[in-house]
Image: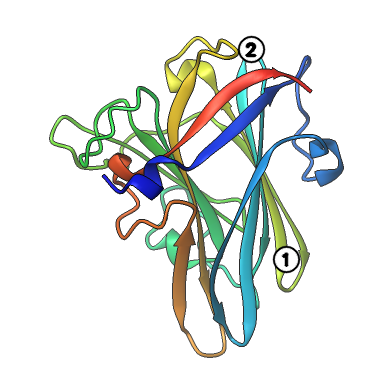
Amino acid sequence: MNLQQSQRTIRSRRIHGTLVLDCNLGKWQGAESVNFQGRPLGGKPRQATVYTLWDSQDLYLAFDVLSSRLQAVVREHDGQNLWWDDGVEFLIDPHRDRTQEFLPDDFSYHINILNAVYDDRGTPSGEASPTWNGVARHEVKILDNYHYVVEAAVPWQEIGLEPCENETAIGIDFCVNGKDPETGQYDYFDWCGLKVFHDPSGFGELALIGSL
């Protein structure tokens, strides 16, 4: 495992009461965040800031993404090549097994700017299967032709853990997909710098801490 990858950490602060998914970033003030960048497309810089919070029911994530001119075509659940659309991904390794295989406790969500989702879960053979359907809630707001926000609430029941501040930690990676509509040039980038996203051995760590 790459040592630099293993040191990537984000701390998630606890809130009391349900967080409304309305893609208003004002409510994330005080939340800890990470920022990562991709190579420019269509002459436009590309970067993402991801915020996280949690409560007793859900883990919350917010992606604030600047990209090349936005485009998306997939509207159906588990639609083919959804990841070629502009959108985000998050991948979770609940028990921090840190294997290269995508095991049955591991899962991921791909959410495009039309709020369509492709979700998958690991299998005993170590391959991701799209036959699994998650129950995370998610919302998307396009702010302009180059800027959008995605929010998600992932139930702890789906993660398979009982959250406890200063004790619970999970493996995680955050990713951004994009394709310039004029050139057709596609590119993706992620927080942990992985060549293969479904590789928990390179995931960072999200640790639960106390209230804001």
As drawn, the residue found furthest toward the front would be 3
Give me the residue at 56% from left, 59% from top: 87
The Cα–Cα distance between marks 1 and 2, rounded to whole angstroms, is 31 Å
Give me the residue at 57% from left, 14% from top: 166
Residue 101 location (% of width, % of height): 20, 39
Give me the residue at 69% from left, 37% from top: 32
Image position of 152 (left or right of 123)? right
**Residue 24 appears in the picture as rendered:** no
- SS assignment at label 1: strand
Q: Quadrant of residue 20?
A: top right
Q: Nearer the viewer, residue 170 or 41?
A: 170
Structural crowding at the residue carrying mark 1, measured as other residues with C-alpha within 10 Å and reported as few (<14), some (14–19) or many (≥20):
some
Kind of residue at badge 2:
Ser
Q: Which mark is residue 147?
A: 1
Q: How many marks?
A: 2
Image position of 183 (left or right of 54)? left
Above/below status of 122 relative to 4: above
- Upstream in the sequence, badge 1 or badge 2? 2
Residue 116 location (% of width, % of height): 55, 51
Residue behind mark 2: 56
- SS assignment at label 2: loop
Residue 74 location (% of width, % of height): 50, 62
Image position of 88 (left or right of 64)? left
Above/below status of 56 relative to 48: above
